[in-house]
Image: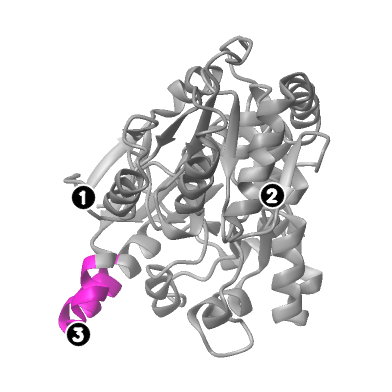
Amino acid sequence: MRVLFWSELFWPYIGGGEVFGAKLISALQEYGYEVIVLTSHDYLDLPDEAHYKGVPIYRVPFRKTLRGGDIDQLSELCRRVKKLKQTFKPDLIHINAVSSSVLFHLQTAEAHPAPVLVRMNTEILPREGAASDTLTGQVLRAAGWITCVSSTVLAQVRQWMPEVVPRSSVIHNGLNVPLQSQEPFPIAAPRLLCLGRLIPAKGFDLALVAVASIIDRFPHVRMVVAGDGPARPELERQAAELGLGRVVEFVGWVEPNQVAALLNTATMVLMPSRREGLPLAALEAALMARPVVATRVGGLPEVVMHSQTGLLVEKDDSRALAKAVAFLLSHLQEAQEMGQAACRRAKEVYSWPRCAHAYDALYQKLIKEVPLESRSHSPSVVR
């Protein structure tokens, strides 16, 4: 069975969706699926065609073309997508989050009809509301099934569009237990960690304000900001203006296989997000027995159990964030116990085998619902 995995960006771009996608297509190969990835070019200089662990990757300048708005170029990309669909003839199309490039899927939906699975990995913004004729609304209406990474996102999707209730469900993100052994977290010189894409939605600006407000009380505290993105220059300027030049270190992207080692150097992880789905960083922190201080948005309250595996605060409240961080710094034994509880729960609820098996079962269900005679099985070499 063949799967066209549609992802706005893909490895070597790094983010929660990109890491999930790379893990899932590797799992799909193990389950016996033939997979290709269709994705967009962006700021990295990458070839139009490549392979990731044997899986063909096709990169198309979706983003650049949409920004330019040239009708002829838009038509040419639609032609290329249509040809790829007709040649590969997927049994299922998996859309890894709704993004601007999905417009080209909608424009070529009739090229090769196949069941479509849409993965919703974050909350819907009001301007994206499915109640109106937005791109998100169109994609969800056309989907054969919708998976959401958290119960919060699922409830929101169902509220926006009640008709999808019978064809929507939760499949939590999952991770393998790291090979890296856990180390005791720093106590004498506590280290706070912000890990993720540097965009306003992650709220790392709030973390900087919080740290600035407690540094006099905890002069040995240091903070590491790991990740990259468009907000990095502004965050660096903010850190300097707050007098945190020697307190905060920006280390850029961290390779996925190095995340566990980085977490071993942290006392706690801060996730003051303004918008979320179910972030992998929260699971990674839990598996390394690090407590998380997070906001009550998206699926974070499903990962961070307040006062059990970490602490929750309201979004956009740097004072509450500072208070929570100060509490854990003043009660390091309790922070350690929270981290251990987080690890136990993550292993039970958010395992990668459970996540991969759930997608395999759903693929089988959706593909079997489409009559065999409606699917052609000609050679799938794409040129």
Residue 4 percent coordinates (x, y): 47, 54
Q: Is residue 6 above or below residue 334?
A: below
Residue 262 lies, in percent from the top left, at 47, 22
Amino acid carrying mark 3 in the image: Ile
Residue 12, position in %: x, y?
A: 32, 38
**Main SS of residues in magenta:** helix
Q: Describe residue 334's horizontal placement relative to residue 10 as left or right.
A: right
Front in this rendered view, residue 253 or 13: 253
The segment highlighted magenta reads: 64-80
Residue occupied by mark 3? 71
**Residue placed under numbered mark 2 in the picture:** 300
In terms of sequence position, does the residue under pointer 3 or pointer 1 come before the other? 1
Marks 2 and 3 in Cβ contact (< 8 Å):
no
Three-letter code, disc 2: Leu
- The secondary structure type at the circle numbered 1 is loop
Is residue 104 on the magenta stretch?
no
Image check: 347 left or right of 270? right
Identify the disc placed on residue 48: 1
Give the class, few, some or many, for how many residues have Cα within 10 Å of label 2's Cα (few <14, many ≥20).
many
Disc 3 is placed on an element classified as helix
Foreground residue among 376 and 351: 351
Q: Amino acid at mark 1?
A: Asp
